[in-house]
Image (spheres, rainbow, N blue to C red):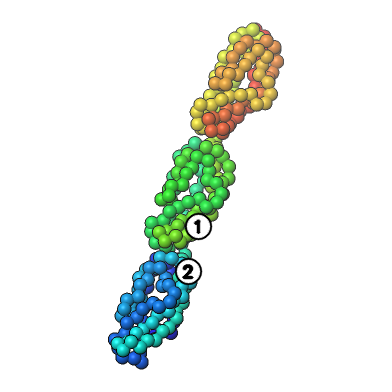
Amino acid sequence: MKPNNLPDGKVGHTYHKMIHASGGDGPYVFTVTNGTLPPGLTLMPDGDLSGTFTAEGNFTFTITATDQNGCTGTRQYTVNVKCPDIKVKPNHLPDGTVGTPYDKTITASGGTEPYVFTVQSGNLPDGLTLAPNGVLSGTPTEEGDFAFTIQATDTYGCSGKNSYVVSVKCRDITLKPNNLPNGKVGVPYNKTITASGGNAPYTFSVTGGNLPSGLQLSPSGTISGTPTMATGFNFVITATDQSGCSGKRNYSITVGFH
């Protein structure tokens, strides 16, 4: 019986090989009499071994050729079926910004569509999700460096993967005005600090130094009150947005007399 050996194959690939017999009185009828063919292949009575591989593994089987007189011959074969090399793209993902929508599609090639994409290890940036079709989207909610591995599994269960690192940064938050007016003892003072660049609303706080005696800073950014002491005051005001990102500015106010 020929051939002596059968070629190996890959999952999802088509396969076609003819088994032949000689020495008896044809025609011959070919059957599998032991073992199991690779899933997806069939052996026709005329010796046509064909189909599309659907699973990986080593498959050993015996084919028997029976001639018209009932005489037989056999040969054992082993076919090694491997998964194809599935590549996941892109090689790298862009970084993100807290509060800014993110949308990127992961793709795969080399296997048999459709693919299902999953996070095999690590963690996506907070606020992002990976859909089964490979769309990585959402709005990052926290800064940091996030490492994760995405796996693509094809219709036959073969898979490939790629590892990524996405850095998420806060946007620059700017406080205004650049400078604050000076004040006078006993004279009411009122000035509002504003912020831009982040995700409103903002919460304002004094994170360094001291406001002039008699003045307070509200969480909404308003400095108000009546100064009670004549001197110079240096302080830092920080604005924190709803995502936890912050910006700050140094200020000074000199309080004098009328």
- Is residue 219 among what the camera can see? yes
Q: Which residue is drawn at 35% across and 75% down?
A: 43
Could you say whether the residue bearing mark 1 is in a helix, strand or loop?
strand
Residue 202 location (% of width, % of height): 53, 26
* Residue bearing mark 2: 57
Q: In this view, does 213 lie above or below 245?
A: above
Q: Where is residue 133 in the image (x, y as percent from the top left)?
A: 41, 50
Q: Residues within 10 Å of mark 2 (few under 14, many from 20)?
A: some
Q: Mark 1 to mark 2: distance in Å?
A: 20 Å
Position of residue 144 measured from the top left corner of the image (x, y, whole percent): 58, 42
Residue 161, numbered label? 1
Identify the residue shown where x is 53% and y is 30%.
242
Residue 91 visible in rendering: no
Lower position in the chain sequence, tag 1 or tag 2: 2
Q: Which amino acid does label 2 sit on?
A: Gly
- Residue 123 placement (x, y as % from top left): 55, 46
Whether 54 is drawn above or below 75: the answer is above
In the picture, measured across the screen, residue 86 lies left or right of residue 50, that is right
